Image (cartoon, rainbow, N blue to C red):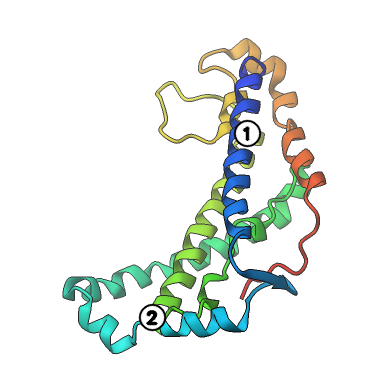
Amino acid sequence: MGHRLEPLLKEIRALETLVSDKIHDATEAMPFHFENGKPVFGLDTRRHHRTLIKRTWKFLREAPLLAILTTPVIYSLLIPISLLDLLVCVFQWICFPIYCIPVVRRADYVVLDRHRLAYLNVIERINCVYCGYANGVLAFAREVASRTEQYWCPIKHARRVNDSHDRQSWFCEYGDGDTFRREYETLRQQFDDVKAVSDNSPADATRDQE
């Protein structure tokens, strides 16, 4: 059961927080600050960045032909990803309040800011926006799905699942019907860890999503 793994889960989350803090510390060392939620570099830095731009024609000339030819395939996924984004948002807006599940903040997962870097050309900026959006939506959808799974089917799989979400550690063991019936209602409402994180996270109304 999940309570047996609680100390390990707390240690994992502490390590994840430590890694995040280290990454943030490295970011803070960079010469930019935030204004209205947007990263802003100094004038000298912006001028230097502009000297690093690889012109679009040169970028295309040096790109492998097969990489260019596969571009329509990559960007064709924008349609289903955008649809997934919309449907997941609608789903949790409608269902999570009914299920009493904490709503997932989309802005914590879909972050679009790399296109403002002055050393990127037009194509690189578009690619960065697309990558940030696609990966953010998939991470957002995964979190919504994990909370939904905990509510409706908090049972572990019989087979090992690669990269399973950590909420599964609280699920009932496969085949343990007695525990499932006894703890089902408790398990499907066990979101104290998410509520704690939400309570400690200030509202980021200025976070940019352009």
**Residue drawn 33% across the image and 68% down it:** 74
Evaluate if marks 2 and 1 touch, with contact meaning CB atoms under 8 Å apart.
Answer: no
Q: CA distance from mark 2 to mark 1?
A: 37 Å
- The disc label shown at residue 123, or none: 2
Give the numbered dot on residue 39. none
What is the secondary structure assignment of the residue under circle 2? helix
Q: Residue furthest front?
A: 44
**Label 2 vs 1, first from the N-terminus:** 1
- Which image quarter holds the N terminus? top right
Q: Quadrant of residue 178?
A: top right
Q: Position of residue 85 (x, y in %)?
A: 56, 62
Q: Quadrant of residue 184?
A: top right
Relative horizontal placement of residue 31, taking residue 101 as reference (left or right): left
The vertical placement of 70 against 121, above or below, is above
Determine the secondary structure under disc 1. helix
Can you tell which mark lies on residue 13? 1
For the question of whether residue 148 can be seen, the reply is yes
Residue 172 percent across, percent down from the top left: 59, 20
Would you say 104 lies left or right of 138 here?
Answer: right
Question: Looking at the picture, which amino acid does disc 2 mark?
Answer: Ile
